[in-house]
Each structure stands twice: as C-alpha cells, then as structure tokens.
Amino acid sequence: MNGSKPTSKTMRAVQWEGINREVRVTDLPRPKIQAPEDAIVRITSTTICGSELHVYHGILGQSGEPFGLGHEAVGIVEEVGDAVDYFKVGDRVIVIAISEDGRLRDKPTIMPLLDGTRQGFGLGPEFGGHDGLQATHARVPWADSSLVKIPNKFDDKEWLPLCDAWPTAWTGLTWSGFEPGDDVAIFGAGAVGLLAAYSAIIRGASLVYVIDYVPQRLAKAAAIGAVPINFARGGSASEQILRLNPAGVKRTVDAVGTECLNAELKPQQGFVFQEAIKITRGGGGLGIIGVYAPETPANPAPGWEHVNPFVQLPIGQLMFKEMQIKSGIVEYKTSIPALVSLVLNGRARPGFIFSAEADLEDAPRAYRRFERREEVRILLKPEQDGDRARALGMVGVPPVA
C-alpha cells in the first residue's frame, strides 16, 4: 500500500438524512484502503447534480437510511492499493460517477448497478452503496478502471463535467441516432441538457433548440449558439417548435426525467416523452438520459408516492413515424477519452455550466438554491484538514432570504 498516512481520522462530507430536503455537512470516518484495487482520492472539487435532487426529494434512496451524497469529483490520488497499476500518489484524476470492475461484458445486464460489476457513488444502497463524493476524501474501488488521469492544466471546473454530466449528454445525443447536419431539440437546460446542446453544436448539428422555462438556463443555451424555447410562454414546446419548423426535428433528447413539468409548470410524468415524439420527424430518434425511477422498491423513499414507474406513450405516433428510442445507464469509458481530447485541444470548455462556487460547508444552502433553479450548477470546494483559508460562504451568490 503506497501513500502517506492521513493527518486526521475523520473528514467532512455531505449526508442525506433520510428525510426530504434534509442534508447536512458532518464528520464521517476518513476512508481507508479496503482492497488491493482501491485508491484514496483527496477531492478538490465536486458538484450537485439533478440526480442528487431526486434523492433530496425522496425519489431515490431507501427510506430513513442516511447516506453520503455526490457522484462527481476531481481530485488528487493520496493513496493506492498494492494492485493498482496505472495510478500513483499525486496524480490528478477524474472520479467516474459509476465505478467499474474492469471486466469485459459481451452483453448488457438488466440492471448493471445491481449486479455488482458497476457501483454508483452517493445515490444510496440500491444503486451501489458507495460513499458520496461531496466530501474531502473518497475511496475509489477498482481504481484502474474507475479513474481517469488528467494533466495539471485548466481549472477543475473544466474537468468536473467529464465525471458524469458531459459523458451522459454526449451519449444521449448518440442514442438519438444523431449525425452531422441533423437538427436537434433538447428538453431540459440543466447542466446535462446544456451539454447535450453543446455536444450537438460541436458535432455539427444544423440547428439546436433547447427547451426550458428558467431564464438563466435559457440564456446559457443562447450563449452557446442554441435557440432557446421557453415552454411556459407562448404555448407548449411542441407548438412553438412546429410553428418555427413545421417538419419537426430529426433528433430529440430527454434530459429531464421523471420530475418533468407540463406547460402550466405542474408535474406531469411522461410529458416530455409526449412532446418529443410530437416534434420528431419520421425516421428520427429520441435519446433518453433523464433519470426515471425503476420498479417500486421494497423499502421506498419518502417521496416515492409521487412517482409512477410507468408512463404513457403515444405508441401510434411512435410506430408510424418509425422512430427509434434508446435509454440506459451510460458507459462512461466509451466517451471520456474523446471529451478529454476536446478540452486539451481547446475545442471545448464545458465549465460554462457553472454559475456559482461555494464552500462544501455551505452545501445545505447550495442545495436549496439549486432546487429553486436559482443556479444552473454549483461547484463545491472542500476544505482540507481544517485549512479554512477560503472564507466560508457562497462565492458571488447573494444570501438566501
């Protein structure tokens, strides 16, 4: 086992309390090497994703069982197990959101997060059970296939989207059947939706619509060259896009998931599906990367009563348009190398998605702001070993009323 001994036996980490909208920053045991393939990473930056909001709202996570949050992080390798071949102490790394055992599988599994070969960070026992990455340190199992080395170049904000948000967005576009020259509509202008639009532009889309209702998000979509569509004004998204483009678009991406809203801004699960199928041309495709809840768990989380694992689809339109639909759990390693090259070569700067920075100690307030759509993405900076040189508090963000 290689590396220096930790100076403290505890670390600071964000924990969901098993109660809707209750998170806190607490002291937890600092992780240790448990298997020869493990690495310990000192986290330098992490973030809050929409998937964490599903936990925050009680849609994911087992009822009454607190656990650490966060599944995206950039950091420095602090310790490695004896069987780790490709990483050493001091390497700067991306922690991939779902750790992988490195075994080659010749066909997809039904639930890869439950078969033991892929395990997610910070999303609760039913999705792998790893501790969260909104912390000062993390144990990364199967480090050789679950970390990506990056150079000491560019701020963390340019690398952090590569942990999950950007590979997910890139893959969702691919799942739609995208080809250069296609026109595209992206439902949702959170970080993943914006990065799906960004990917489409990089990959040669002729036109990209981005659909949301939050002005700050739509402004970011316009800033990267997409056409913003506010579905809460002037009719539904499908009505507005079909007025602009009566033939519809070739490709659509659902980057919203189970907590989608209708044109009246009321919850209507499946509404994005229906809208996407309306505007997709014959022979087109829909990529689904927004999270939808699986079958009802034996011990449902406290928000599960608002979720239905089944949604209605206009199957006739889908069939006669000869559309393709694809969704699933993203295989990050197939896209991350290309995304690293795009950043290194100056072709992409995905850090544009971040609208604020905060200290990890301010995570409860950051969650409230993120839930209220007051920020597009918040970058969280953990302090290390009691070093409080950075002033606590949201950087550049007004206090919460």
Image (spheres, helix red, strand yellow):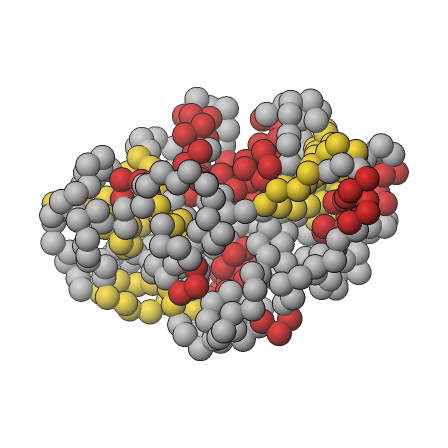
Q: Position of residue 70 (x, y in %)?
A: 41, 56
Q: Position of residue 153 (x, y in %)?
A: 34, 31
* Depicted 14 relative to depicted 316: above or below: below
**Residue at image point 31% right, 35% down:** 149
- Which of 33 and 199 lies nearest the eye of the viewer? 33
* Depicted 149 relative to depicted 260: above or below: above
> Is 42 on the left-hand or right-hand side of 271?
left
Q: Position of residue 390 (x, y in %)?
A: 33, 54
**Residue at image point 38% right, 33% down:** 154
Quarter location, residue 57: bottom right
In this view of the protein, can residue 147 be seen by the observer? Answer: no
In this view of the protein, can residue 212 be seen by the observer? Answer: yes
Quarter location, residue 353: top right
* Depicted 272 relative to depicted 25: above or below: above
Q: Position of residue 292 (x, y in %)?
A: 59, 57
**Residue at image point 46% right, 48% down:** 109
Quarter location, residue 229: top right
> Is 173 on the left-hand or right-hand side of 130?
right
> Is 93 on the left-hand or right-hand side of 191?
left
> Is 285 on the left-hand or right-hand side of 317?
left
